[in-house]
Amino acid sequence: MSASIFNKEFLKSKTALITGGGSGICKGIAESFATHGCQVVIMGRRADVLAETCKGIIAAGGKAISVAGDVRLIEDCERAVATATREFGGVDILLNGAAGNFLCPTEHLSSNGFKTVIDIDLLGTFNMSKASFEALKKSSDAVILNISATLHYQGTIMQSHVMAAKAGVDALARNLACEWGEYGIRVVTIAPGPIGDTEGMRRLAPLGADKKMASEIPLKRLGSIADISNAALFLVSPAASYITGEILVVDGGQWLSKPAFVPRETWEKLNTKR
Ligand code: COA
């Protein structure tokens, strides 16, 4: 990660419980939080992947432990919170990052395929939020940070399952921001655009589709994991202490833009008035 503009110790003595933290975007956020003094508990289904990520964080001087579990199971979520409380004294930041995705035209999607993504993304976010509530209530500076998407702002073909799940995640976040504000719990969301070198991009933009995608983004590049972890650092920092219920889109302008009516070169040929 490039030099951080954040104080290296601003998360000192805080604990973050991070689902999906073994790989991809949430691994990057876990590393970044640890670099800023945070104790991290990473949860995911693959114990070997989690162990490897923890090893890296500890080797870099951070504090990390892992809990193998499935966010679809409330008892696994409760176990993760109990582990964080036992090992690190509580939970200050809950990062709901565990997600499932694959491309599938809706007419080919089974009922169980649809349900599986709803269960991981939406039920998983509910389960983790509910399981963490008492611990978060005890924190002086509690934040729930959800990783959502921009897919559901428009129609995204072959993504009906994910669009429905992420729309639900966003609705739940707005609700919890209102309901749990009185307990001092902020609820914020990052909606990443296409982020290079992630499982999500390998699934959604195979066969070189990522290059075309990058060329169509206003900022002309895919996002990086550091782009998302910097946004996460801001949202959990005191600089964001009056922000709740808000979604920060980090996508280089992708979802806003549509193709030009004609290429710029065509305009140059046509236009005599400058
Ligand atoms: N296309 C269509 N349906 C699919 C599918 C695909 N590529 N992959 C899985 N499914 C369906 C399965 O057929 C099954 O439905 P069925 O019982 O009617 O056949 C259902 O989804 C559940 O599949 P299963 O493999 O048992 O689920 P799982 O819990 O082991 O895995 C997934 C969950 C499917 C989301 C899997 O892709 C995963 O683990 N993803 C995590 C990583 C990830 O997606 N990262 C990117 C996040 S952006």
Image (cartoon, grey):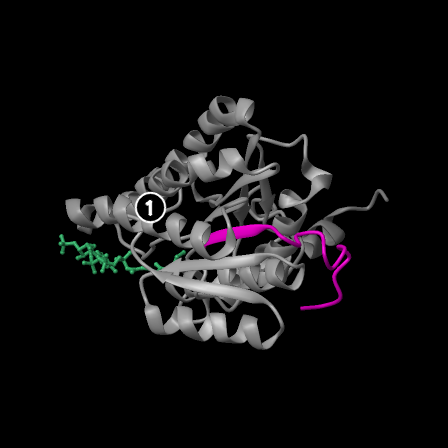
Three-letter code for the amino acid on which mark 1 is drawn = Glu
Q: Is residue 60 above or below residue 39?
A: below
Residue 6 in magenta stretch: yes
Q: Which residue is nearer to you in this view: 142 or 173?
A: 142
Whether residue 193 is visible: yes
Q: Which residue is nearer to you in this view: 59 or 116?
A: 59
List x then y, in percent, for residue 59. 57, 77
What residue span does the magenta drawing correspond to?
A: 1-18
List x then y, in percent, for residue 70. 29, 54
**Residue occupied by mark 1:** 78
Q: Residue at x 41, y 31 (%)?
A: 172
Residue 263 in magenta stretch: no
Using residue 259 as the reference point, say whether residue 114 is left or right of it.
left
Q: Secondary structure at mark 1?
A: helix
What kind of secondary structure does the magenta stretch mostly adopt?
loop
Label 1 lies in ligand 1 vicinity (Cβ under 8 Å): no
